[in-house]
Image (cartoon, helix red, strand yellow):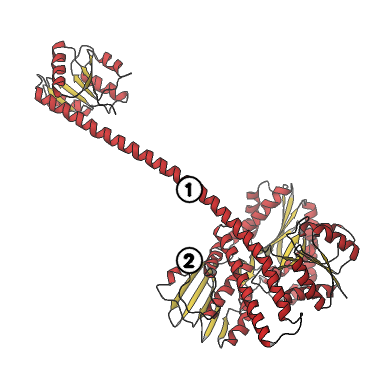
Amino acid sequence: MNDKFKIIIVEDSPTDTKLLVDILNSIGHEFNVRIAGSYRQAKEYFQDYVPDLILLDVYLPDHDGFYFLEEIHKQGYEEIPVILISAFSNTNEKLKSLELGAIDFINKPVVTEELKARIKFQIKLKKIMDDHIWASEKTNEGIKLLYKDLENKNIQLKQLDLLKDEFINNVSHELRTPLTIIQESVSIMADGLLGELNEKQIKHLKITLENIVRLDNIINDLLDISTIENRKLKLNQENVDIVDLVKKVVSNFVVLVVKKGLQIKCVVPEGKVNVFVDKERIYQVLVNLINNAYKFTEKGLIEVSVVENDNTVECSVKDTGVGISASDLPRLFSKFDQIARQAGAGAKGTGLGLSITKGIIELHDGQIKVESTVAQGTLFRIILPRPSVSKQYKNLTECLGEVKLKHNNYSVLVFNIKNPGAGNDRFLDELKELIDKQIHRKSDQTIRDNGSVFVILPDTKKDDALVVLNRIRQTINDMNWDKSYNDFKGFIDKIVSFPEDVHTEAELTNLLKIYKEAI
Amino acid sequence: MKKILVVDDDPQIVDLITIRLKANNYEVITSPDGNDAILMAQKEHPDLVIMDIMMPNMPGGDAVRLLMADNKTKDIPIIFLTALTANLPHEADHNGIINVDGRFFPAIPKPFKPEKLLSEIKKIVEDH
């Protein structure tokens, strides 16, 4: 910070100049003063000397002071305070000078005390401004340092996170090998392959085996949560009949549930309800939820249901168990947080099950909701989006994207069902199965959409694709579906070939969409 | 008696599977890695190979590729038995599948349930 206060006095009269300098000297502050006899000279000073204050006589030989004010504004020095000194004759002149950016004016003849007060005020103002600028510069520097520090810490954390993932992966794999050996050793003993055992011995080996399964589940949970958290979990999405899946999971629980004296019931619509999901992962979610219901229910009923809404499919698991207190509900899905629910011996898990469940559902763009009353029971609702055309087109686009990377030309066969609808979509499943049996190249792909089946044939020109199409048409004819089923009205088929018909992926997707909407 | 080749770099696992298979009336031969397994398969013509994946010298996947490439061994059925199970179903009541260059093989995750392994073996060797 420079303590000297820089002033330019613009004044042509030596007497007046001397008076001004004397006044400055009497203030008792250190000044750096330059004197300009004309505006031109004052402007020249600006090149290497930007003042903190200008004392400006309004009438000088070359121009008047108003011209000077305009000039210094044009040159970008409007921040410099200017005090006009003049024998102001009228108010208009004063107003004009203020308008042009002067901050103050002093009447001639100059009253010493008045000018001193004005200048002192400017010095004080400058000091306040300087302090302020200094402080904010310091703050900025501080923020920059903090930011850099945070950036470095973030990089370190990311590296640590990677190490953690790798560690969890390796450890999981390394844990499984000894676990396999322990499990199979105990199994071999329990199965009597190494000699006969008494009942007590067998009982304890069975307990050991149960706990090996628990350990294995914990390892799987750790791996799952680590892949979900790092968004590395890849879903294998396909059209899945959720009714069939729910029935399958429930049937696996029947023996266990009945043994505990509970009932289990499936409430599902008749026929298929398709969702576009990763079958294994949704299976895992259902097992998690039903297993929870089983663990925390001592008497009564577990009800698993599927309900179709306009844009969603809801799947719920309801029990008549111990319930969850309102204060515990918000923590329910958080990692490692086990709420104080009473479970039977050996029922304690990793506390990861519900976080994994939530993670999987959210990856499917779905939601999970819970309602519960202590001592009455709990209801978990999974809300999954219905298979949307656009999403599956994305899937088609993804497949095409991969094909395009590896092949210069390809054809796509499109089969649209003439009368789409819930019941008729089964023909698409059957068609996909038929086609899968007919295509032998592993690079060929069949995609089942909710109104169509697509067959992607890489390295296939339009003529060759037509041969494949005719073969499939013949097979469909041979099936005689129209004779067996009243609701079978046939398929509309098309071939789109790249690069004969379309030149870009977007064009292709558009064309396929048009074909689809045409029916 | 059906002959099964067990390939795993862990001798304790090999021993245990051998006990289990012999108790179920299978003849068992073993290999500690992929290289040895190929020689063994060419020489012994097993009815089935149980293949680990993470092994020194040659991983299981590569060994299977070589078995598939050789006319003498290409039709031998294979079951993968592996602790590398990121993509294998743990919860489901069916087994996983591993795709090697377009051919699909059943895969059972370690630690395995003996009844799961035995039923898969039975299904395959009785088909052949």
Q: Is residue A305 left or right of residue A414?
A: left
**Chain letter, disc 2 residue:** A
Q: Is residue B84 left or right of residue A382?
A: right
Image location of residue A152, percent across then percent down = 48, 45
Q: Residues within 10 Å of mark 1 (few under 14, many from 20)?
A: few
Q: Residues within 10 Å of mark 2 (few under 14, many from 20)?
A: some
On the question of residue A458 being in view, the answer is yes
Viewer-closest of B59 and A5: B59
Residue drawn where x is 66% and y is 66% of the image: A176
Tell me the quarter of the picture where residue B16 sits.
bottom right
Q: Amino acid at mark 1?
A: Lys
Q: Which residue is the site of mark 1?
A: A153
Q: Amino acid at mark 2?
A: Ser
Tell me the quadrant of the picture where the N terminus of chain A can be found.
top left
Picture disc at residue A316? none
Image location of residue A460, percent across then percent down = 77, 52
Tell me the quarter of the picture where residue B84 sits.
bottom right
Picture disc at residue A334? 2
Q: Is residue A248 above or below residue A356?
A: below
Residue drawn where x is 29% and y is 17% of the image: A45
**Chain letter, disc 1 residue:** A
Residue drawn where x is 19% and y is 26% of the image: A96
Query: How many tags in the picture?
Result: 2
Viewer-closest of A503 and A443: A443
